[in-house]
Image (tube, helix red, strand yellow):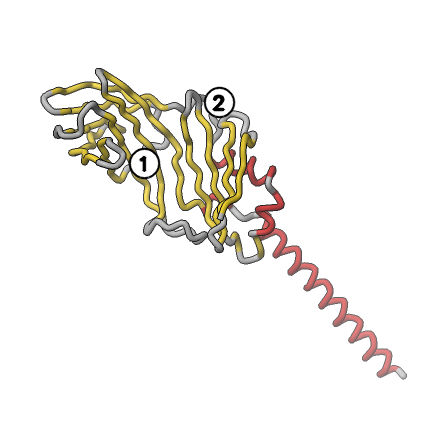
Amino acid sequence: MTKFLIKKRGLLLLKTTFAILFALCVGLFASCRQEIDYMDYVSELRSNIFLASEQGLSLRIYAVSKETPYATDGIPKECSTRVEAYLVAPEGDKTCKISFSFDGKEYGGEMSFDNVKTEYYFSCTLDISKASELPCRIEYGDRALEMNALSVRTKDTLTPQNILKNLQTEEAELFASLTDEYGFAGEIYIRLIYEESPYYYVGIIDRNGQIHAFLLNATTGKILAKRTSQ
């Protein structure tokens, strides 16, 4: 009888221990899900825009980070941080060069002309996401112009991190459907855009290529429009 009671208590203790361990594991998995940083799944980020115009030339410069190779497949890859500069000019048959100052150093080079978009283009590896202005020099044909490109961001413009947190709160069901204990089954695009005032575009792409697109107010984080497409 004594042996039976000891054995019974042993089994009860084992079951209790197993239940506690199981509860701890569930809690751990839940904690891991809560601690997911969705910025780790951003495969394209445009965090700043700089604008300038002078004598018929229109310049815009983007602070971007993009995956390589670039593919809308729902799988984030390693990203590189770059400057992308675009110049709209009256004619595209002239030689065009850009140079700009940042953090006490000079950057730039010859701009190539895109016949499809009818604009000049230059890119280099550099992080200018936190800059407020970029003093530039444009050599267009036999002309040379000084252009100070100013950021469209203001003190009230939300960061990409805060925009994504706002969207995560508003679209909790969507994020939950793509999240498990292994992480997030998709990739995210965040682009600052400017149409008289700044906005954010956020695209969430799942592994099936379905895109959930959102337009958000850059100051409040409010969703202005959304669309789902394949």
Residue 36: percent from the left, percent from the top? 54, 48
Q: Residue at x 44, y 25 (%)?
A: 198
**How crowded is the residue under tag 2: few (<14 C-alpha within 10 Å), some, or many (20+)?**
few
Question: Measured along the vertical axis of the image, is residue 82 above or below residue 221?
Answer: below
Q: Count up the numbered dots.
A: 2
SS under mark 1: loop
Q: Is residue 29 left or right of residue 142?
A: right
135 and 206: which is toward the camera: 206
Residue 143 image label: none
Q: Residue at x 24, y 32 (%)?
A: 118
Q: Is residue 172 left or right of residue 80?
A: right
Which residue carries the number 2 mark? 156
Q: CA distance from mark 1 to mark 2?
A: 21 Å
SS under mark 2: loop
**How crowded is the residue under tag 1: few (<14 C-alpha within 10 Å), some, or many (20+)?**
some
Q: Amino acid at mark 2?
A: Asp
Q: Amino acid at mark 1?
A: Asp
Q: Residue furthest front?
A: 116
Residue 127 image label: 1
Question: Measured along the vertical axis of the image, is residue 14 above or below residue 4?
Answer: above
Residue 97: percent from the left, percent from the top? 16, 29
